[in-house]
Image: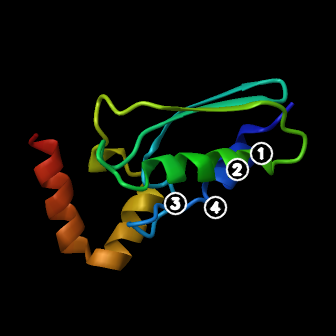
Amino acid sequence: MVEKEKVIDALKTVYDIEIPVNVYDLGLIREIKINGDDVYVKMTWTSPMCPYGSLLTKMVEDALKKIEGVGNVEVEVELDPPWNPKELTEDGKKQMEMLYGKETVEKWLKDAASQ
């Protein structure tokens, strides 16, 4: 049985190509299911038009396959509803604040909440 924490740890090794925050803390991972040794992940991209979306999806798949004992890996992309900054984890928010400043991130989140 693959442990969820190992899956999350693997996901945290994959960084968005344009935003230097990992896909888990960025909030791109919408669902994780583990069935014995098989892992299913539903993810999104920061934009439906993301030029690196398919590469990012492949990077997630490859990271999951590196987990010891993992069997089949399925990564499904869900673009609707679109990603929203409100999906950042607390760690993701802190990382964004370090990169762009607390005021900028708070404004960004406030603007996203009003949409």
Residue type beneath disc 2: Asp
Disc 3 + disc 4, Cβ < 8 Å: yes
x, y (%) of residue 12? 60, 57
Residue type beneath disc 4: Thr
Residue at left 77%, top 45%? 65
Horizontal side of 13 relative to 107 (left or right) equals right
Q: Which residue carries the number 3 mark?
A: 22
Residue at left 31%, top 28%? 80
Q: Which mark is residue 65?
A: 1
Q: Which residue carries the number 4 mark?
A: 13
Q: Which residue, as the protein is rendered here, is positioned at the far right?
A: 69
Residue type beneath disc 3: Asn
Residue at left 39%, top 66%? 19
Disc 2 + disc 3, Cβ < 8 Å: no
Residue at left 10%, top 40%? 115
Disc 2 + disc 1, Cβ < 8 Å: yes
